[in-house]
Amino acid sequence: MSEKLQDYPFYPVIQDAMTASAEAFYTHKNRLALRKALQAAIELNQLIEELNDLKANTPPEVWAAME
């Protein structure tokens, strides 16, 4: 399987959050940057939890076929 990170449905969400955080740092708005970075971390954590739930409810042979 030759999927790229950009092919995953969660990629635009993380990319947007990280871009917003980087832009805030660039403009020296440290408080805003920290808030955006924390929001990105929260969203990433939620996506990881969803993936773990999905994996827990999917037969192992399905995951093996995707590797």
Image: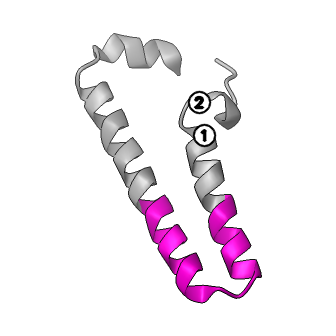
Q: Are marks 1 and 2 in contact (CB under 8 Å)?
A: yes
Describe residue 66's horizontal placement relative to residue 24 as left or right: left
Q: Main secondary structure of the magenta part?
A: helix
Is the residue 66 above or below the residue 29 in the image? above
In the visual, does 4 lie left or right of 60?
A: right
Q: x, y percentage for residue 24?
A: 67, 76
Residue bounds of the magenta highlight: 19-41
| Relative side of 10 to 51, left or right | right
Residue 29 location (% of width, % of height): 64, 85
The magenta stretch spans residue 29:
yes
Residue position marked by numbered label 2 in the rendering: 8
Around disc 1, counting alpha carbons within 10 Å, would you say few (fewer than 14), some (14 to 19), or many (20 or more)? few
Question: What residue type is disc 1 on?
Answer: Tyr
Disc on res. 63: none
Q: Nearer the viewer, residue 11 or 30?
A: 30
- Mark 2 residue type: Tyr
Marks 1/2: CA–CA distance: 6 Å
Give me the residue at 53% from left, 37% from top: 10
Q: Which residue is at the front of the view, 21 or 59?
A: 21
Structural crowding at the residue carrying mark 2, measured as other residues with C-alpha within 10 Å and reported as few (<14), some (14–19) or many (≥20):
few
- Quadrant of the drawing holding the N terminus: top right
Vertical relation: 29 (above or below) 54 = below
Give percent across and percent down for residue 43: 43, 53
SS state under label 2 = loop
Q: Which residue is mark 1?
A: 11
Q: Nearer the viewer, residue 65 or 3?
A: 3
Q: In this figure, which colouring scheme has been used for the structure? A: one colour
Within the magenta stretch, is there residue 31?
A: yes
